[in-house]
Image (cartoon, helix red, strand yellow):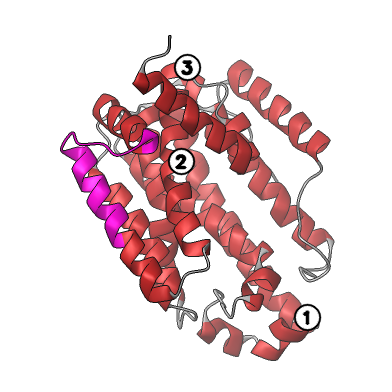
Amino acid sequence: MATALQQAYRHCAAVTRARAKNFYYAFLPLPPARRRAIYAVYAFSRCCDDIADGSLPPEDKVRQLLDLADDLDDAYHGHTKGPVFEALWDAAQRYAIPQKYFLELIRGVEMDLRVRRYQTFEELYEYCYRVASVVGLTCIQIFGYRDPRAKEYAVDLGIAMQLTNIIRDVPEDRGHDRVYIPQDELARFGVTERHLLEGIVDEPFQSLLAFQVERARDYFRRGHRLLPLLPRLSRPCPAILEALYCRVLDRVEAQGYNVFQGRISLPAYRKLALMGTVWAQTLVLGEPRLPA
């Protein structure tokens, strides 16, 4: 019969498989113990997102996030509540994951409840760091690394992925009265929020999106330096995610930056083919090529 801890890890794996298939399959190359730990981290991040995506008033969501932070603190003192925290605490002990990473994630989700516009990229960077880069920092604790530069590159890779999400999700975010593209950059390129509300794809909007795509690619180029600093068996995981996200940027460009004609994604068969190629390339060559 499975122990309570084994059941907790199985719960986290099931959550990951049901809610984030890309992540679930991207981390399959990891040794089992590290893979289970990654799924525990994802399950916790899902708890944060589910609070933010719920139907309660913002003040109630903030209260739930504060309760989640309290539960996290209890877990770090050995008093776990439920399977997610039981698995998370075990993973945190095994891989020396600082509590502050998870607290930063909670703060990032809380930002989404009170900030709907970002004036500058510096403000947006703080948000991206909290909701994405700290997840990367958590992951490399589990992957294993020796060179301290790995932290810098993990941050860059997280920024790149979140910027890609922002580019792809412009239509979805506008529906929730959120604009993540910095206000000063909208003004610089002559783009108004009317473009976003009405789905106007003209030369100013295309130039703005081209700028956003190139910035995301620049962060991918920096984040790619993380891969050779990781153990060989850990490299395929971030490499696969990097490749999938870069393909999203490719499709944005291929559509003439028209992100309003439907959610941009890769068909399942292409995802699987890409994952297989990157996985094999990483294990054979030691370091995959950065997607063009």
Nearer to us of marks 2 and 3 is 2
Q: Which of 94 and 182 is in front in this view?
A: 94
Of label 2 and label 1, which has the lower sequence position? 2
Q: Give the range drawn in magenta.
A: 66-84
Question: Residue 90's spot in the image, x, y percent?
Answer: 29, 27
Image side of residue 103 versus residue 231, left or right: left
Rendered location of residue 89, percent (x, y): 28, 33
Q: Mark 1 points at which residue?
A: 199
Q: Label 2 to label 3, Cα distance in Å?
A: 18 Å
Badge 3 amino acid: Pro
Q: Disc 2 to disc 1, how far (Cα)?
A: 34 Å
* Viewer-nearest of discs 2 and 1: 2
The spot of residue 184 in percent (x, y) is 51, 86
Asked where in the image residue 202 lies, by quadrant, the reply is: bottom right
* Residue 31, x across and y down, in percent: 47, 17
Q: Provide the residue designation for mark 2.
A: 43
Left or right position of 238 against 127:
right
What type of secondary structure mainly makes up the magenta span?
helix
Q: Quadrant for residue 151, please give it.
A: top left
Whether residue 82 is in magenta: the answer is yes
Question: Looking at numbered disc 1 in the image, what kind of residue is underneath it?
Answer: Gly
Task: Give the residue displayed 67% in from the left and 29% down from the top.
Answer: 278
**Residue type at mark 2?**
Ala
> Which SS class for mark 3?
loop
Q: Against 244, is 193 above or below?
A: below
Position of the N terminus by quadrant: top left
Residue situated furthest left in the rendering: 77
- SS at circle 2: helix
Q: Tell me whether the residue at label 2 lies in contact with that at label 1, contact meaning CB atoms closer than 8 angstroms.
A: no
The answer for how far apart the CA atoms under marks 3 and 1 are is 45 Å
Q: Identify the residue under disc 3.
A: 31
Q: Which residue is drawn at 78% across and 30% down?
A: 273
